[in-house]
């Protein structure tokens, strides 16, 4: 499973979806899907724009969680 940390990054900076959309040029729906972690696929240009905007690497924006391991 891939976890998107966009909501955390936005919360730390007190940004709204409309702020990120305006500043990055990405469609509001793209940001909303990533924010709510309901996106099925993401365009690499969108990932690049978000990484540049927040000054983070891809690994800071997305995290792979192994869904096959059970919690203790």
Image (cartoon, rainbow, N blue to C red):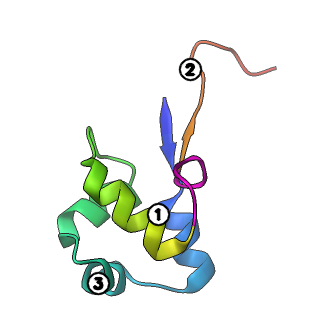
Dot 2 crowding, Cα within 10 Å, few <14, some 14–19, many 20+:
few
- Give the residue displayed 17% in from the left and 70% down from the top: 27
Q: Which mark is residue 18?
A: 3
Question: Is disc 3 in contact with disc 1, using a CB cutoff of under 8 Å?
Answer: no
Report, in whole angstroms, how far the alpha carbon at label 2 lies from the one at label 3.
Answer: 32 Å
Of labels 1 and 2, earlier in sequence is: 1
Report, in whole angstroms, how far the alpha carbon at label 3 lies from the one at label 1.
Answer: 17 Å
Dot 1 crowding, Cα within 10 Å, few <14, some 14–19, many 20+:
some
Residue underneath mark 2: 67
Of labels 3 and 1, earlier in sequence is: 3
Of labels 2 and 3, earlier in sequence is: 3
Where's residue 30, x and y in %? Answer: 23, 60
Between 20 and 11, the residue placed more toward the observer is: 20
Label 1: which secondary element = helix
> Which residue range is magenta in the image?
56-61
All told, the count of numbered labels is 3
Quarter of the image where the C terminus is located: top right
Seen in the image, is 59 located left or right of residue 7? right
- Give the residue displayed 51% in from the left and 42% down from the top: 3
């Amino acid at each position: 499973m891939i976890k998107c940390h966009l909501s955390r990054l936005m919360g730390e900076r007190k940004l709204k979806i409309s702020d990120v959309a305006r500043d990055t040029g990405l469609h509001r729906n793209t940001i909303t899907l990533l924010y709510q972690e309901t996106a099925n696929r993401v365009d690499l240009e969108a990932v690049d724009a978000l990484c540049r905007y927040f000054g983070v690497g891809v690994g800071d924006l997305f995290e792979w969680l192994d869904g096959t391991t059970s919690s203790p």
